[in-house]
Amino acid sequence: MNIQIIQDNIIKLEVDAIVNPANSEGEMGGGVAAVIKKAAGKKIEMAAMEQAPVPIGEAILTEAGKLSCEFIIHAPTMRMPVQRTSTENITKAMHAALRLCREFDLKKIAIPGMGTGTGRVPFEEAAAAMIDAIKKEEFLKSPDMEIILVDKNKEMVQAWENYLAMPDADTDEEE
């Protein structure tokens, strides 16, 4: 597995799928979800809402509309829009998103900072929860898997980099 960390806009990346840190209702009104909806088209939100409610710990897949990727993985970190979330919910959302990657044989995915916007989880805590979840998924150890941790926020990018650089971080990933 290769983990890349970049500061960029998730909707610009050439990947199989991007992850939307969603809410259980499928509404895409704020944060990363709003950016995705604006770029992909409103039908993406409608497709997500048709599959709602999606419990935290599960994820759904929709087409990506006008984006260059094939799919959007909607992985709820909160039940209702604009709720405060937790690292536990981030971990559950990450595992749910990664299970869909395995199920649909997605090899290159982009994931933004989960729960750090409207969910208000500190960057360092979100980074630890996300990276720990990635490390626990055995299928990701395949050399052809590529995970791109991407965020426009420099502090989120720095939190991922700092967590991966920790001496006890057991990782063979590249940055």
Image (spheres, rainbow, N blue to C red):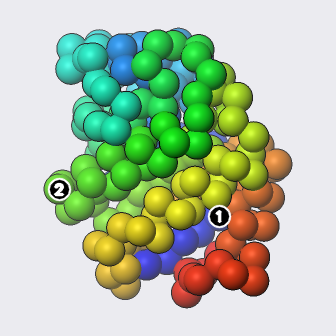
User: Which disc, if any, is residue 5?
Assistant: 1
Residue that carries the numbered disc 2 in the rendered image: 103
Q: Position of residue 14 (x, y in %)?
A: 45, 55
Q: Quadrant of the N terminus?
A: bottom left
Label 2 neighbour load within 10 Å: few <14, some 14-19, many 20+ = few
Closer-to-camera residue (125/45)? 125
Q: Is residue 76 left or right of residue 163?
A: left
Q: Secondary structure at mark 1?
A: strand
Sequence-first tag of 2 and 1: 1
Cα separation, mark 2 vs mark 1, equals 24 Å
Q: Position of residue 134 (x, y in %)?
A: 46, 64
The extreme left residue here reads 103
Q: Position of residue 162 (x, y in %)?
A: 78, 67
Q: Quadrant of residue 119?
A: top right
Closer-to-camera residue (149/52)? 52
The extreme front residue here reads 88
Closer-to-camera residue (105/40)? 105
Q: Are marks 2 and 1 in contact (CB under 8 Å)?
A: no
Res. 10 visible in picture: no
Q: Is residue 175 left or right of residue 40?
A: right
Q: Secondary structure at mark 2?
A: helix
Q: Quadrant of residue 5?
A: bottom right
Label 1 neighbour load within 10 Å: few <14, some 14-19, many 20+ = many
Q: Is residue 10 left or right of residue 147?
A: right
Q: Quadrant of the C terminus?
A: bottom right
Res. 104 visible in picture: yes
Give the residue type at disc 2. Glu
Give the residue type at disc 1. Ile
Instruction: Decide: is 55 above or below 130.
Output: above
Q: Residue visible at 17% across and 56% down?
A: 103
Instruction: Decide: is 111 above or below 132.
Output: above
